[in-house]
Amino acid sequence: MIWNETKECMSRDELTAMQSARLVKLVDYVYHNVEFYRKKMQAVGLLPGDIKDINDICKLPFTTKDDLRDNYPFGLFAVPNSQIVRVHASSGTTGKATVVGYTRYDLDVWAECVARCLTMAGVSKDDIIQVAYGYGLFTGGLGAHSGAEKIGATVVPMSTGNSKKLTTMMLDFGVTAIACTPSYLLHIAELLENEGVVDQIKLKTAICGAEPWTEKMHRDIESRLNIHAHDIYGLSEIMGPGVACDCRFHKGLHVCEDHFYPEIINSATMTPQTVGETGELVFTTLTKQGIPLIRYRTKDLTSIDYAKCECGRTSARISRFKGRVDDMLIIRGVNVFPSQVEAALTEVPEVTPHYMMIVDRVNNLDTLEIQVEVDNKYFTDEIRGLEALTKKIGHTITQALGLSAKIKIVEPQTLVRSEGKAVHVIDKRKLY
Ligand code: DLL
């Protein structure tokens, strides 16, 4: 909810005026504090004074994940490290992670945005919430945690990886809300069903995100656990969870537009889509200090609606995500690019460049198998040698992706060769 001074929802005109003022300030800020943006603006003959209101945003250059990678680790930071109080990181397209930094102010804004999302989902200080997103470099755990603390809920920082403890505590503590990925929640539902204790839980609300999920999964979670499930969106480059969330009417995700300005573009022509048309979501961080980003291309596909919602909120809503422009996969909540696998395999001299990633979902948990073709001479080695090689490849992959995979060495010449664009992924997950 974005309030004006009289504590009513801001009108769109008020909001637009606020966004304009913030954009003008932001452009001046990045021009003077981030060499990357100064050079990009100079390259097109743009000065900060040329940006007079939010409509001028289309004059500004785009930013991509590769720009973060090329400036690894701190090159896009607008403040010295003495003002950065936290860093997070997510997968880059190859090798290096993309790193983001937060000032104390940024962390406050982040907690505020997540608090709004939780409030939208009906969570309050009276709730006991299990945060079962991963804590660490991933933004999910700590991000959801801070927002839940801000509204005064009782936070149980579960993180990921111990489902039995989670279900036991859910029952023993009388947990009323949970924040985790939708696939993990389906897994938890299954465990509770197998234990025959679904009717004993006190759970009312789930705040799920970090990966794509369908309406059908949404309904399934709600009916199996008898709860309300909400869709929360975010990405580490922009902030983490809390960029947008859906309210009880579930008619799209309300964007925290006073902090993150959304645009929908046609990624082929790089021009704006008309309202309601699907395209790539682009964000400008209007208030960030640590790593402010201008027109960041999320690669996520959605559409936007500016009509006032039945809940009374005036903020723009983006539709449930319809996919991505690039080939990024999300496996067990971890972002994975096939190019990372390719880069990792080049570190193993015995391996040829032919590989296939097979992604599946078993008992609502994602699995990854990587089939790798090795050189003839290694394949004919005795089985002990193959085992050692499988281990070696597995270790290299785990290091590169931050995710373990089952490695299967296949006979030379067995993986399909493509005549066009090589196909390296078979995603069998039924996003039902
Ligand atoms: O996944 C942040 C997050 C944590 C969001 C917890 C929600 C809950 P990254 O690891 O940088 O950040 O991955 C960002 O995940 O570009 C989308 O492709 C995808 N994604 C995130 N939320 C949703 C969602 C976090 N609700 C990438 N629906 C994004 C569909 C989502 N995809």
Image: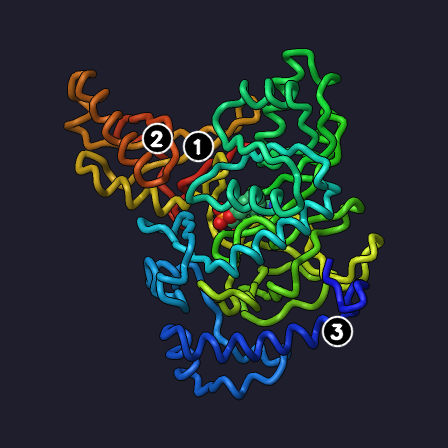
Residue 156 image point, x, y percent: 57, 32
Question: Is 65 drawn above or below residue 406 in the view shown?
Answer: below
Residue 171 appears left or right of 402: right
Decide which of 157, 291 is in the foreground and name it.
157
Amino acid at the residue labelled 2: Gln
Residue 431 seen: no
| Label number found at residue 358 | 1
Quadrant position of the C terminus in the picture: top right
Local secondary structure at mark 3: helix
Name the residue: 50% across, 84% down: 48
Which picture quadrant has residue 24?
bottom right
Q: Earlier in the sequence, mark 1 or mark 2?
A: 1
Local secondary structure at mark 2: strand
Residue 35 image point, x, y percent: 36, 75
Q: Nearer the viewer, mark 3 or mark 1?
A: 3
Name the residue: 56% across, 56% down: 108
| Label number found at residue 14 | 3
Residue 168 image point, x, y percent: 59, 18
